[in-house]
Image (tube, rainbow, N blue to C red):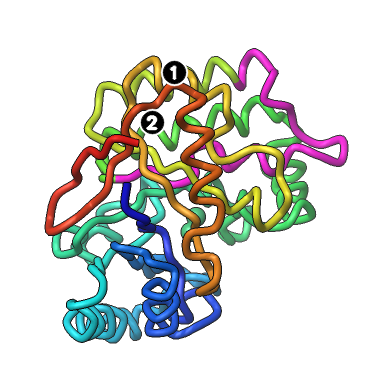
Amino acid sequence: MPLTNYHTHTNFCDGMSHPVHYVEEAIKQNVKILGFSGHAPLPFHCNWTINEKKYGEYLNTIQFLKEQFAPQIEICCGLEIDYIPELWNEIHDAIRPETLDYFIGSIHFIDSYENGARWSIDGSHAEFQKGWKTIFHRDSHAVIRKYFDYIRRMVTEMKPPVIGHLDKIKMQYSHNCFIPETDPIYRKELMDTLEVIAASDCIVEVNSRGVYKRNEPELYPSFWVLTEMARMNIPVTISSDAHRPREIVSLYKDTALKLKEAGFKHTRYYSKGVWKEEVM
Ligand SMILES: [Zn+2]
Ligand SMILES: [Zn+2]
């Protein structure tokens, strides 16, 4: 199967380098298809998304690289788009996702503080605990229910071609806060979510960033989730969620082995306008 990655952040959002450096590194590492997925602009202040004033430049830059490097590598232009139910129409109209090659739908926000500031579940433990205490009054199950409810609504309303880091919320389990994946309510929420995904056309990305970046023991999603997904025939694509050129295909081979162990026989990859199935 060809080396590919569709989850790549550059210095247009919170990545470290200009897109051209990722392309050069991808060619060096024999990557066949590279997809850029900058964090889509949001209609509120956020320091890790593409500034709306830079969005046109982002699209033009990727298009330029696509043409310039066409003989050596296939480049795709995408975005990682936050699904926030009450803002989805506004975000959709500003971005027009249908004009992209593909996009990843992700959940990073599930609520706001009283002053209106958004609470991210993808930041530090300290930030997570602040919202857990002040917004959810330490009710971990309420957080879990809302997180997976948002994923399910994202699948049915946003219909993303790819679902980003399905169980990212598990990274916040620590420091006497929150619940482990073995919790029955966590498991039920996750299984209900897989049912909704299985009935959709969405592909779930298998994301290695937690393992190579934060030394987490498990991929997103965890191995037990992957075995359930394989049983339910939910399609997958391998991604690194790279924020630096050298991370483009981090742990790609280990991730493929894990997928085989979990029971997968195929992965999906995007090329020339369509998602195709590839034998592993
Ligand atoms: Zn993300
Ligand atoms: Zn990302």
Res. 42 in view: no
- Residue 25 x/y as whole percent: 45, 76
Residue at x-position 28% and y-position 41%: 268
| Residue lying at 41% horizontally and 79% vertically, measured from the top left | 51
Q: Nearer the viewer, residue 70 or 231?
A: 70
Circle 2 SS class:
helix
Answer yes or no: is residue 16 visible.
Answer: yes
Decide which of 8, 70 is in the foreground and name it.
Answer: 70
The amino acid marked with disc number 2 is Arg
- Look at mark 1 in the image and give the residue it sits on: 192
Separation of marks 2 and 1 at Cα, in angstroms? 9 Å
Tag 1 secondary structure = helix
> Which quarter of the figure is the C terminus placed in?
top left
Q: CB of mark 2 within 8 Å of CB of mark 1?
A: yes
- On screen, residue 187 versus residue 268, left or right, reads right
184 is within the stretch colored magenta? yes
Q: Magenta segment range? A: 162-186
Q: Name the chief secondary structure element in magenta.
A: loop
Q: Residue furthest right?
A: 176
Q: Which residue is mark 2?
A: 152
